[in-house]
Amino acid sequence: MAKYKMHVLVCGGTGCKASQSAQIVENLKAVLTENGLQDEVQVITTGCFGFCEKGPIVKMMPDNTFYTQVKPEDARTIVEEHIIKGRKVTNLLYTDPENNEHVSDSKHMGFYKKQIRIALRNCGFIDPENIDESISRGGYEALGKCLSEMKPEDVIQEIKLSGLRGRGGGGFPTGLKWEIASKNHADQKYVVCNADEGDPGAFMDRSIMEGDPHSIIEAMAICGYAIGATKGLVYIRAEYPLAIDRLQIAIKQAREYGLLGQDIMGSGFDFDIELRYGAGAFVCGEETALIHSMEGKRGEPTFKPPFPAVSGYLGKPTNVNNVETFANIPVIITKGADWFNKIGTEKSKGTKVFALAGQINNVGLIEVPMGITLREVIYEIGGGIKDGKEFKAVQTGGPSGGCLTKKHLDTPIDYDNLIAAGSMMGSGGMVVMDETSCMVSIAKFYLEFTCEESCGKCTPCRIGNKRLCEMLTKISKGNGTMEDLYELRNLAAVIKDTALCGLGQTSPNPVLSTLDNFWDEYVEHVVDKKCRAGVCKSLMSYEIDQTKCVGCTACARNCPVGAIKGEKKMPHTIDPAVCIKCGACIERCKFGAISIK
Amino acid sequence: MTKVKSLADLKAMREKFQSNLDVREKSNNQEEMVQIKVAMATCGIASGAKQIMEYMMEKADAMKIRVVFTQTGCMGYCHAEPTIEVKVPGRDPLVFGHVDNKKADEIFEKYILNNEMVDGIIPVNYEVIDK
Ligand SMILES: Cc1cc2nc3c(=O)[nH]c(=O)nc-3n(C[C@H](O)[C@H](O)[C@H](O)COP(=O)(O)O)c2cc1C
């Protein structure tokens, strides 16, 4: 086999693929061949590097040069300059926004400095479609260790000691969950991987499956061994075609190597995995709804208990874990619970993967130790707020979570602190907002999402959320009253207490947390009829400055509703009762005479 | 298709495949490893830099020394090609000229392993700005 002197890693995550990274790979290979270097330089498509803001990413090894925003036509320069002449292509290097200097080694980039990669250990490092690369990094060794050196109870004990808690949102201790499932005897049990990932803006689980599918397969088999199940199911949304593809390839390769199937590694243990596709409904991420959906029934939740560990898929004991939870398992087994539980805070061990999005400089995927502060995440890793604007809030936990504000910036992030602050960890979406975000509109956005995604089975969720949404709409239109604000709180509390499943029980959180943290802004909307962020259209009025208007009539001619009146060469006026605030007049005015108040 | 029949099998496979990822693994902690840069401009290649690099890679493997090899552009010592720069952790980088297989052996056995001086060092009188 040829021994390559250099490896070129090209990101093949969904984001970078959309920016033609596959073409970059092809061009690199072509130019290498042209120069007779195809046996010296290997080009590898990997999973996500996380630095999606500046994708597509190309990384040169062994010198660790990190190229950003690479275009297919840059392939030639990379080969001819970097590979042949040994000179870095400076215009593709990342520029540190602080001092405007080029950073060539990703280790020195602020984005990576504070990260610890456990769940993402192989993402952006190996070729996810090649099981040999996974094995070279120790893939399936944890499974081998469990099967040959540990009893199922030992495995469960190790996971319990590690302190790992579920990464799908609830934070339930994983070892305990496995123990419950193991103690329920049945002729057949199931291991289910929850890969539904329905939070808007979240792509942690997708990236793990795209970048390191073998770690999920290995972990599911370990879980099967621990609880006594021989069948695994991955419930994945059909909107994740690349992740599905890579999982399928990985399952096939694992079967060929005998790492799935019968008598795995000569231990007598059998385990196999199948995929089940979801149609992309948020509620189907809830474990009971997910199980119904897999059974071919409507994706509606049912009351717990019984918990899936007692009666799940086809009425059999079923252990449901999230993708990221599983991704931690092999590392805990290989490195030991003692290694793992030194990372993080007292009650939240290990790391968490977050999808950073919104008004932040470095949008992307990060993995940080529990206990890191929001300030470190937003300013050091995220590179601060876009366009030098001011930080206003960060939304965590998606539609079930809440908004945290400046006063929470130094709170260590873990399950319990986030709940105490009125939000939750959720699955790891983190949407950063600046001063141009209106908090009433944000709450409304999440409520609209919940109304859309509510399955309709229970009244509090189906009708209660609709009412909340209507009240928020009324407030944003300028028709709200102080009574509405109190009523919002009351109704939110009732929904939380009475809804059937986690969706309804948490859906009022975005309303409650914005009421708590941005009460003044709500009051402004109902009393002063003002939206300080300038988002709620109905609360804005357009005015023409009589001293600046020259009466050119451009605005009046372009107003679609005829709200602007005035004589030629005389200052015009806008009739607020007719104006629909479309902004067409502002665009046309050459004299800067029109403003929003 | 080979089947993995035991943990030992799996570990043997890992051993076998591992060298394929060596280039990547090493890049993660370059600073702790011996780094050898080989000048690979036209003049270097013409005087056999490629063959020397391959020879040294095999030598490093045989001696089980972890070395990160990179190729660089012309270092400016065209009179002494092939030239290589050797950086052992904790020591200043040294540039050697006219490197052939024999010289390479010496560099590995004497300089890298035992910090003994070897002939052929080119005095370097510039500071590298770009890190
Ligand atoms: C409305 C709703 C949506 C959910 N969506 C997801 C999801 O997309 N992915 C996930 O892993 N868990 C989701 N959960 C949590 C699951 O019900 C379950 O707790 C989780 O999969 C358990 O795995 P873990 O213990 O590893 O976190 C959701 C829960 C609710 C109430």
Image (tube, coloured by chain):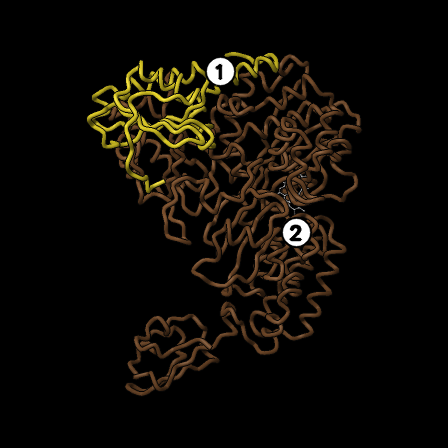
Ligand 1 image-quadrant field: top right
Q: Is A449 on the left or on the right of A317, as rendered?
A: left
User: Which residue bears the numbered disc 1?
Assistant: B16
Q: Is A47 on the left or on the right of B103, as rendered?
A: right
**In the rendered image, is residue A450 in sight?**
yes
Q: Position of residue A378 (x, y in %)?
A: 53, 53
As displayed, is residue A271 above or below residue A100? Answer: above
Element assignment for label 2: loop
- The answer to which of A182 and A62 lies nearer the viewer is A62
Q: Chain of mark 2?
A: A
As displayed, is residue A433 above or below residue A127? Answer: below
User: Which residue bears the numbered disc 2?
Assistant: A424
Q: Position of residue A491 (x, y in %)?
A: 72, 63
**In the rendered image, is residue A398 in sight?**
no
| Colour displayed for chain B in the image of the structure | yellow
Circle 2 packing at 10 Å, graded few (<14), some (14-19), many (20+), is many
- Residue at image position (71%, 53%) is A505
- The answer to which of A216 and A107 lies nearer the viewer is A107
- Residue at image position (52%, 15%) is B13
